[in-house]
Image (cartoon, rainbow, N blue to C red):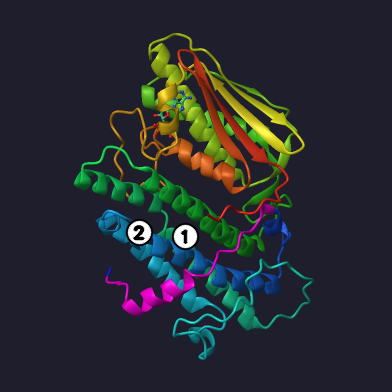
Amino acid sequence: MSWKRTDKLMETIKHYSKFPATGVSLRQMVQFGEKPSTGTLFRASQFLSEELPIRLAHRVQELSELPDGLNEMPSIQRVTDWYAQSFEGQYKSAPGSSTTNGNGSSNGERKSGSARRYYVPADDGQGWPPELSQYNNQFRETLDRIKRRHDSVVTTVAQGILEWKRKRQRMQIDHNIQAFLDRFYMSRIGIRMLIGQHIALTDQRQRSDPNYVGIICTKTNVHDLAKEAIENARFVCEDHYGLFDAPKVQLVCNPDINFMYVPGHLSHMLFETLKNSLRAVVETHGQDKEEFPVTKVIVAEGKEDITIKITDEGGGIPRSAIPLVWTYMYTTVDQTPSLDPDFNKSDFKAPMAGFGYGLPISRLYARYFGGDLKLISMEGYGTDVYLHLNRLSSSSEPLQ
Ligand code: ADP
Ligand code: MG
């Protein structure tokens, strides 16, 4: 690991960070159709190779300017390096950059936004030059490397905040840091969405499921995803508390409801909120209870929204703690599970609770595509979580 940020690179990054990011909507992302041609993929690569450096540059700038010495914490430095390194890789792989045609922007100037609109695929002819397809494949590899490099960003930033809290003897993170984390993780969701979508589109040319465009499913079935999330959450709950049978969850949902969404995002939100409910139910009623009150998942389909309500009888949350549940690292678990930076790797076993990231990150996922996550509690009885999902799919990514 001998990679280092050079002054020259930092200057280029600073330059790029002055350009605004371009938001993309779910609808725009599916305009590719299921089987994009070589030419379409090339245009998509062009857009990304202009867009990603800008988004990465914003993050590097912001990380390096974090207040109060937070920017100097070793884990924050590591993350800054990852972003800068990915910036460098992207910047070099851009079509028309110095490495691809020898006369490009090696001195940190970017040419004015030729591809800075989200590509709308046009009809493609046949017979693309082989270099184009070769370029596409190379670009896909670069993206894959970036994605893997950033796998453990969330836990490493969390680690950085812990380092800083320890050093400064802080108990809670303040409004500034909370706002930074919201922006930072939201941006990460966006970057990973664009990268994940592009990789899946490139690979998709080999397989075919007519309901999928990249990682977007045009007919995401809410019932099936909810059922799976319930099973997973109950399994983790049984495992964690050593229960033979986790509290029951009743699903009230028309099995035909479907809409355009990223199934991975929806699964994440359902899994996190369900784990919270199951934990509250078990801990409120006691682990050795024979029977627990049933948690309900109710799905409603409107014109504008699909709303999912998760209702539990887990004792609720005191009103004074409600603002805290949205802050990162707020948890009522005494012992935080270890923040192993490799925790996102494939053999990772999802913890029941303890990072205090479940709710705030789920809310970001909901908001990313124009939805929201709300929570209403009745202290002494239970909690209702409302997950609103925008089904119009025309809202653009929230950037800042
Ligand atoms: P974690 O589950 O890792 O603690 P979350 O962000 O998912 O982090 O939740 C933060 C805190 O909010 C929990 O520790 C818990 O105290 C409270 N909470 C969340 N959901 C519920 C719920 N359904 N009932 C009671 N308390 C809840
Ligand atoms: Mg949780």
On the question of residue 345 being in view, the answer is: no
* Residue position marked by numbered label 2 in the rendering: 79
Q: Amino acid at mark 2?
A: Val
SS state under label 1: helix
Check disc 1 and give the amino acid type.
Lys
Residue depicted at 39% across the width and 69% down the height: 85
Q: Secondary structure at mark 2?
A: helix
Which mark, residue 124? Answer: none
Could you tell whether 381 is left or right of 224 in the image?
Answer: left
Q: Which residues are magenta?
A: 2-26
The location of residue 71, given as percent across then percent down, is: 30, 58
Place of residue 132 in the rendered image (x, y in percent of width and height, measured from the top left): 63, 79
The spot of residue 197 in percent (x, y) is 60, 58
Quadrant housing residue 46: bottom right
Residue 9 is left or right of residue 141, and the answer is left
Q: On the rendered image, what quadrant is the N terminus found in?
A: bottom left
Residue closest to the eye, 395 or 339: 395
Residue at 74% of width from left, 60% of height from top?
33
| On screen, residue 269 above or below 27 | above
Question: Is residue 14 shown in magenta?
Answer: yes
Q: Position of residue 111 (x, y in %)?
A: 56, 81
Q: State the residue position of label 1.
A: 147
Q: Residue at x 65, y 60 (%)?
A: 204
